[in-house]
Image: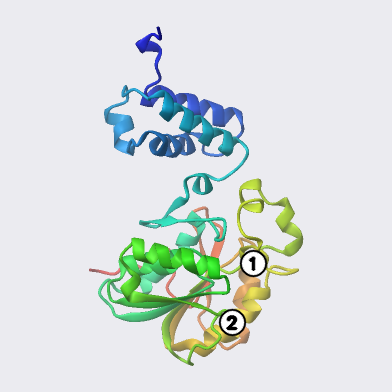
Amino acid sequence: MTDPSSAPTLVTAWKAATARLKAGQIDSPSIDARLLLEVATGAGRADILTDPYRAVTPEQQATLDGYLERRLKREPVSRILGKKGFWKIMLNVTPDVLSPRPDTEAILDVVMLAFAPHQAFTMIDLGTGSGAILLATLAERAGARGVGTDISFEALAVARDNAASLDLDGRCDFLRTEWAAGMADHSFDLVVSNPPYIPSDDIDRLDPEVRDHDPRLALDGGPDGLQAYRDLAPEILRILKPGGIFAVEIGWDQGPQVKALFEAQGFTDVIVVKDLADRDRVVTNGPDPRTNPIPKM
């Protein structure tokens, strides 16, 4: 008979999973192990702390082992579980969309400062993918309404599903078009985008989690990584209302070039905003979260 005392518990399974991932040189092994353990066992984050000696069944352990094998092959946790947290929402993700990253939340930092909690405004998310930026904004700003565009039918299906899951589908629409094609002039208070910005020749040198699992369409920014911004700058100027705000994500070394592209279109007061890692991450004509106070409720 199996000695019950040797059966894995939440805490021992977590520690063992962390050790396996660490030995496999996986970044953030403890966090990844916890996320996989939670789904494999149905436990919540608090359960691991408050009920650490809860037994893990053989079936649950087998599920966890399967997850760990996939992670050790550099498949991202979001792909294994089919979901990813972003800002304050949880999103379904598939191989058809870019897995949302914390870096992109720097756009939300700008948006939250630019628009007060109960302010009514219209927005568009160009190249919306999973709908992450649009839906995170709508979840925080009850007066907002928005549109997400993408050229991928599959990505739009994921975005629509996420909107429905978050009960936000009544305040947004998703349209298949290239960037802002077909949108009326001066029709949005806010324009956001996380376009592809990796130089084509650099994609094969990315980490396997990105290179092998994110759609190339969402990564490839052309020979110098800047093609999307050349396309976007005049379109954003066209569809933005006078006094409106735009915010686009950039690669960490692209700030001066992208800023110049928008200034060449006639935008003024364009700034480069840094992310939490102190790297250039957003080009915008909105407020800088580092130098502006949080708006009052």
Q: Horizontal and vertical percent for residue 204?
A: 73, 53
**Relative height, residue 197 to residue 25 (above, below):** below
Question: Residue placed farthest to the bottom in the image?
Answer: 185
Towards the viewer: 62 or 245: 62
Q: In whole angstroms, how far apart are the C-alphas of marks 2 and 1? A: 15 Å
Give the position of the C terminus as an image quadrant. bottom left
282 displayed left or right of 141: right
Colour scheme in use: rainbow
Mark earlier in primary sequence (2, 1): 2
Q: Horizontal and vertical percent for residue 190?
A: 43, 79
Towards the viewer: 176 or 261: 176
Give the position of the N terminus as an image quadrant. top left
Estimate how packed mark 1 is, as few (under 14), some (14 to 19) or many (20 or more) residues with alpha carbons within 10 Å.
some
181 displayed left or right of 3: right
Query: Residue 179 is drawn in which quadrant?
Result: bottom right
Name the residue located 52 percent from the left edge and 26 percent from the top edge.
19
Towards the viewer: 204 or 229: 204
**Relative height, residue 48 to residue 276 (above, below):** above
Which amino acid type is shown beneath numbered disc 1?
A: Gln
Query: Residue 74 is drawn in which quadrant?
Result: top right
Estimate how packed mark 2 is, as few (under 14), some (14 to 19) or many (20 or more) residues with alpha carbons within 10 Å.
many
Name the residue carrying label 1.
254
